[in-house]
Structures are given as C-alpha cells and as structure tokens.
C-alpha cells in the first residue's frame, strides 16, 4: 500500500505515528483490526473509518462474494486476496456462503486525527518519549 497509494498511506498512518513511545501496532499503517469469522453482513458504510480499509479473506468456502453496491461490483475474493476500498463512502456487504469463511479487516478511525493533533486535549498529561 505504501508504494501504490503513498498519499493515502501517509494520511492513514498519522494516528499510529502519534502513539506514545514510538510503538507501532502490527496493523500499521492502520490502527484497528477486526477478525470476522463466518459472518455475512447487511449493506452498510463504515462512516467513522478514515479513507480506506483492507479486507483479506481466509478459509475454505463457496459464495460469500463482496458487493460494492454503488460501483455495481460483485467481487469473488479467494483466500489471501487483498482488497483496499473506501469503506466509509461505498455501501458494502458480502453474500451468503457455505463452508468456513473469515476475513481480516484493517481500518483506522477518523477520530484518530484528534489524538494525533493534541491527544484529545490531554497533550500536557501524556508521556510521548521513553524515559
């Protein structure tokens, strides 16, 4: 992602770069990770997500295509495929499936920008360096 979408990468990683002690989460540049297991969801937008999310399916299943409604796309993902899309702007859901289907979803909350700016108003009370 850093190579193909460098501006988005930098924008998304702002929160991770502001974490105390310089630690980066394993999900970097994203702040959050969700593991879905045997989930088929209704159409929705992740309004609070920042810019993009990454979906990586795993398992052994039939069906379960990911639908990007406004784009008119029905995407058949295979285990280990990587799909990056703006989950906050596109209604998405997956179709019913049989078998074992999971997905790893990487995302960042747009509210992380407030933390990156001034630690949500706590900047005078937060240690940001190793002592």
Image (cartoon, rainbow, N blue to C red):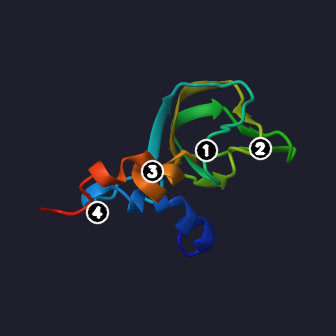
Image location (x, y in percent) of residue 98: 61, 24
State if disc 4 and disc 3 touch (CB < 8 Å).
no
Between discs 3 and 1, the one toward the N terminus: 1
Residue closest to the far left: 131
* 68 sits to left or right of 10: right
C-alpha separation, residue under disc 2 versus residue under disc 4: 33 Å
Q: Which of the 4 image quarters holds residue 42?
A: top right
Decide if residue 82 is in sight here. yes
Q: Residues within 10 Å of mark 4 (few under 14, many from 20)?
A: few
> Circle 1 is placed at which residue position?
49
C-alpha separation, residue under disc 3 versus residue under disc 2: 26 Å
State if disc 4 and disc 2 touch (CB < 8 Å).
no
> Circle 4 is placed at which residue position?
22
Label 4 sits on a secondary structure element that is helix
Q: Residues within 10 Å of mark 1 (few under 14, many from 20)?
A: many
> Circle 2 is placed at which residue position?
90
* Up-down relation of residue 71 to residue 12 (above or below): above
* Up-down relation of residue 39 to residue 114 (above or below): above
Image location (x, y in percent) of residue 102: 51, 34
Label 3 sits on a secondary structure element that is helix
């Amino acid at each position: 992602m850093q190579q193909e979408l460098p501006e988005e990468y930098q924008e998304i990683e702002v929160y991770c770069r502001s974490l105390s002690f310089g630690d980066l989460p394993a999900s970097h540049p994203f702040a959050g990770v969700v593991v879905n297991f045997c989930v088929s969801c209704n159409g929705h937008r992740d309004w609070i997500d920042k810019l993009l999310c990454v979906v990586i399916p795993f398992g052994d299943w039939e069906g379960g295509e990911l639908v990007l409604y406004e784009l008119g796309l029905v995407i058949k993902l295979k285990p280990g495929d990587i799909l990056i899309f703006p989950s906050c702007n596109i209604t998405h859901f997956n179709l019913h499936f049989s078998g074992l289907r999971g997905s790893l979803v990487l995302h960042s909350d747009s509210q992380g920008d407030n933390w990156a700016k001034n630690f949500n108003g706590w900047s005078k009370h937060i240690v940001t360096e190793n002592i």
